[in-house]
Image: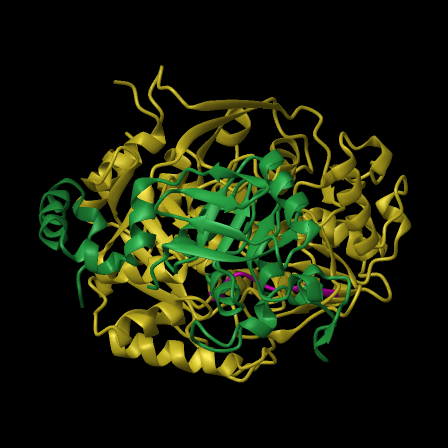
Amino acid sequence: MAKTLFDKLWQEHEVETLSERQSLLYIDRIFLHERTGSVALNSLLESGREVRRREHTFCTMDHIVDTFPGRSDTTLMPSGKDFILATRSAARETGIRLFDIQDPDQGIVHVISPELGIALPGLSLICPDSHTCTLGGLGALAWGVGSTEAEHALATSTLRVTRPDTMQVLFEGSLPVGVTAKDLMLYTIRELSAAGGAGYAIEFTGKAIEALPVEARLTLCNMATELSAFTGLIAPDPVVFEYCKGRQFGPSGADWEQASAHWRSLCTDQGARFDCHQRLSIDGLKPQLSWGTSPQYCIAWDDRVPRAGDALTEADASVWRKMQDYMGLTEGSRLADYPLDAAFIGSCTNSRLSDLQLAADYLLRTGHRVARGVKALCVPGSGRVKREAEAQGLHEIFQSAGFEWREPGCSMCFFAGGESFGNRARIASTTNRNFEGRQGIGSRTHLASPLTVVASACAGYLTADTTA
Amino acid sequence: MTPFTQHIGVTAPLLRDNIDTDTIIPSREMRTVSRTGLSAGLFAPWRYSDADARTPDPAFVLNSAVFKNASILLAGKNFGCGSSREHAVWALLESGFRVVIAPSFATIFRNNALRNGLLTVSLDEHLIQGIQEWVQVNPQRNRIAVDLAQCVLIGAPELESIPFVIDPFSRRMLLEGLDEIGLTEQSLVGIASFEASDRKRRPWAYLDDT
């Protein structure tokens, strides 16, 4: 019978069928971080259990650690040091591999796991972090869980999982120049809604997807959780295989031959059935910017903030008004009408080398500098990204344009390290969530691509790159 | 895990869609490496007009005396979306909540709730609207009884009993307060034999224990 990519991944990991919809799935890799992983490890130790396969278990410091040069265990985050010390001690006690603060490979969990070959096509991977779906961009079966489920996976190398339905999102057309995977995903969430993927494992398909480089695929799948999907997937192809070659924890030699042969089977068969189909036409897509406090509220960068009167229901209208009040926006205005306070390039969505190159290229090409009054941060996603960026001189481009250049971590995605841009600060951000208070008390987050964020930082207001 | 069989309590309405876990408990409010010490941070962005000074915002529903001791939350669709932080569930439980009723839940939140004895009940919006209207008349008197054994909500005498659906495993887990890890440990032999055959099929997926 013809199978979808998700069907294949599910079946390959099925240890036991528990009921019609629930299976015991084998978990190939577990990744933890100091925020939620520390709780899982501590709880496991307290219960007297052990990490069943420590060689398949990894941990990083990214959520609490700060990103200042010369950083230490001490952070501005309330009791942050406790989490860092507890994680280090639990990692030592359980014998799992920790990418600690001074480790050259430390970084954001979803940036380092593909970088190090810990996430690979066809592997199942869980992390107590909702953006674990990022790794679906490699063709891994990866999803986010809570700390208790992470503990279950640590103890048993399995999880009891309720099988989601399958959805195919087919993109028709191709991405215009200067429009990125981030814009594509913001548009998708805008069209399908923040609950549009609930109960589904989504496979993204179409010529535009096949044309995406690996890092852009990771950006796209990263925000599948913003659709409330179980996960997002892209069928792995030779571009992905090439990316995985020679990675530290990835296969080599005879293993490589077997792995890549296996990976070639990881695609949706002709005639396989999805439970749901969505088609989105993307020809002429413009850079997207969010205006509300859920990622589904996006507009093209030059559109006007929606009028509550145009909402389909009175309930929607009331939500729109509340959001506009919080965001300090007037209906019918343009986002360019408001001065920007801050710009942030980073996070598991957009902190990889290609994201940094895109933004640095804009600075180099235009000669623009960060506008007066705008605090601008660039935070590479990992030690490796930082080293590679510095080898290309990107840090100098950012710094001379007025950006701060930081150490790797989650940073201002949610005031990791205890930092914030200040109450009511308007922020152009390459992150994934514009929730109330996400980037600090009263923060007004506008989600966008790295290109839009750098262009806005230089303009001093929200805009797209109009120079290309 | 504390079993859940039945519960009677005051119901508080928070009928916004897409209430995310950053709002349920912001990252800055998660201050201990444990499942406790979280109740003061519950809904901090909405509950306080000044979160640092802990100044209550009188406009927020849970600060209202009429909803004092609320233990059942009525919410909009996609409740618990966003971050996977289980602290959202722990903060609700520590604040006395045992049940959340909403049209739909984010999957990770629902899974977390189930594993901690917090019951999530999915109901159609019009039923939730009906509950809200009935509760609103006199929240302290009009208490909802939630019976998981019968899978029914009772708002006697005026409100008709409302049946709800929950999958059999989740129901059993809650009713018996099952230790899921302990349950799966009974399958450890099966897991080891899966690994033995899987290792032949996917040797590249297995790293050496060094």
Measuring 77% from the left and 49% from the top, which residue is drawn there? A323
Q: Nearer the viewer, residue A239 or B180?
A: B180
Magenta stretch containing residue A380, yes or no? yes
Measuring 53% from the left and 58% from the top, which residue is drawn there? B9
Q: Nearer the viewer, residue A292 or A361?
A: A292
Q: Which chain is green?
A: B
Q: Is residue A389 left or right of residue A84?
A: right
Expressed as whole percent of the image width and height from the top left, the position of residue B134 reads 65, 45
Q: Nearer the viewer, residue A16 or A9?
A: A16
Measuring 61% from the left and 22% from the top, which residue is drawn there? A173
For residue B30, above or below residue B17: below
Q: Quadrant of residue B198?
A: top left
Q: Which chain is yellow?
A: A
- Range shown magenta: A376-383
Expressed as whole percent of the image width and height from the top left, the position of residue B114 reads 39, 53
Res. A268 in view: yes
The quadrant in which the C terminus of chain A is found is top right
Res. A350 in view: no
Measuring 71% from the left and 26% from the top, which residue is drawn there? A284
Q: Is residue A141 left or right of residue B43?
A: left
The quadrant in which the N terminus of chain A is found is top left
Q: Is residue B125 left or right of residue B105?
A: right
Expressed as whole percent of the image width and height from the top left, the position of residue A448 reads 69, 47
